[in-house]
Image (tube, rainbow, N blue to C red):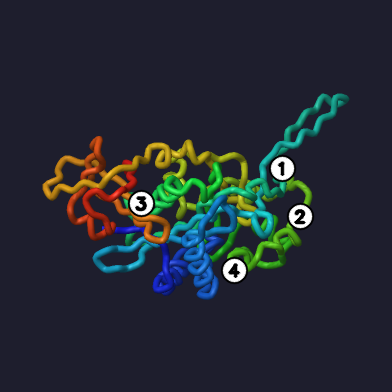
Amino acid sequence: MYLVRPADFPDLPALERLARDAGIGITNFPANRERLNDKIATSRRSFNTDVVQPGSEFYLFVMEQQDTHEIVGTCSIDAMVGVDAPFYSYRIDEVVHASPQLQIHNRVPALHLCHDYSGTTRLNSLVLDRKHQTDENFALLSRARLLFIAHHPDRFTPKLFAEIRGESDHKGYSPFWEALGRHFFSMDFKKADYLSGISNKHFIAELMPRYPIYVPTLPEDAQDCIGVIHEGSEKIANILLDEGFAFRDYVDIFDAGPSIEARAQDIRTIANQRHGKALFDAQLEQTEAYLIAAGHLEDFRVACAPGQAQVAGLVLHNDLQERLRIHSGSLIQWSKL
C-alpha cells in the first residue's frame, strides 16, 4: 500500500537519495541538501498559508510505502512560476523569408526566447524509485497532485504546464546544449542544470542569446532533440498527455525537452473527480480502482484502493480508515484510476 502526502523535514534523507538517483536533467530537484531542506520549509509554509490568489507558494509531496514507511517517490507543484524572475522557455515559431523576384518563399523554424509561462502553475519534479516504478505508482504519484489542485483551485492558475525532461545521456551530455547553450554559458550541461536548480534564474537572462535561433543552423543531432522526451520520462509524459495535456511548441532552454500544458478544467482527473462520504464494507467485492484523497492542506493524503461508487459516497475496505485517517461519514474526494 502506498500513500502520497505532504513532505516534512524527516523526509530529507530520502529526498536526497531520490535526487541523487534521479540523474541529470530534473532541474528543480537538485541533489543538494540545503536546497532540498529549503524546499521542504517553503512547502510547509505554503500548506499553512491562507491564499487568496496564487503566488510564490510551492507544494512538495512524497510517496510512502506504508508497510515499511520508506519514502519511494516525490512530486511537487509551483503555484506560479516567474514571480521573482522571468521563467524562460524557447517558443518555436516560423520566420518567413521571401523573394518575389526569385519566386522563393521559405518558412524557417526558429527558437524565440520568451517567458510566456511566467504567471502559470507548473507541475514538476516527479521522481520514483526504480524498484517501485509500476504503472499504478506512476499514476498515483502524478495524479495525486491533480486531486490537490482540484480541491484547492484558488491556490492555482486556470492553466497548468509541465516541463518534460529532454534528451541527455547518463554522463550529462546533451546534443542541444552542446550546440547552443555551451557557447553562451561556458560550462557543461550538468553544471548549468545544477546551478539552475540551486540558484536564482537571473544568470539565464544575463547569458542567453536575445535573438531568434534558426533551427536549420544547428547541428543535425541538436535539431533532432527539439521537443523529444527523455526515455526515462516517457511514462510521466504519457500520464499527463492522457490527462489532456498537449504540446504547444514550447521547449526547455537547456535540453529542448517539451513543455506541455492544459486548462485545469479540461484535465480528466480534475473534471471527473467527485466528493462525498467515505463508506466502509469489510466484504467489498467486484470493485474498480480509485484514487482516494482525504484531509485538508497539510493533512492531505492520497491512496489508490478498490472502491464502489454509490449515490451516498464511495464504499471502501475497512483497512483504509487508518491509512487515510478517516472514518465512516468522513468527506473524501475520489477519481477513477
Q: Which amino acid type corresponds to the residue marked 1 in the rendered image?
A: Ala
Crowd around label 2: few <14 · some 14–19 · many ≥20 (10 Å): some
Q: Which residue is mark 1?
A: 110
Secondary structure at badge 3 equals helix
Q: Are marks 3 and 1 in contact (CB under 8 Å)?
A: no
Sequence-earlier tag: 3 or 2: 3
Which residue is drawn at the image coordinates 34% and 40% (left, top)?
Answer: 274
Choose mark 3 or mark 2, whichever is in front: 3
Secondary structure at badge 2 equals loop
Secondary structure at badge 1 equals strand
Q: Nearer the viewer, residue 112 or 305?
A: 305
Residue 251's spot in the image, x, y percent? 61, 48
Quarter holding the N terminus is: bottom left
Sequence-earlier tag: 3 or 4: 3
Q: Which residue is mark 4?
A: 198
Sequence-earlier tag: 4 or 2: 4
**How many numbered discs?**
4
Q: Residue furthest right?
A: 101
Q: Which amino acid type corresponds to the residue marked 2 in the rendered image?
A: Pro
Rounded to the nearest whole Å, what is the CA distance between mark 3 and mark 2? 40 Å
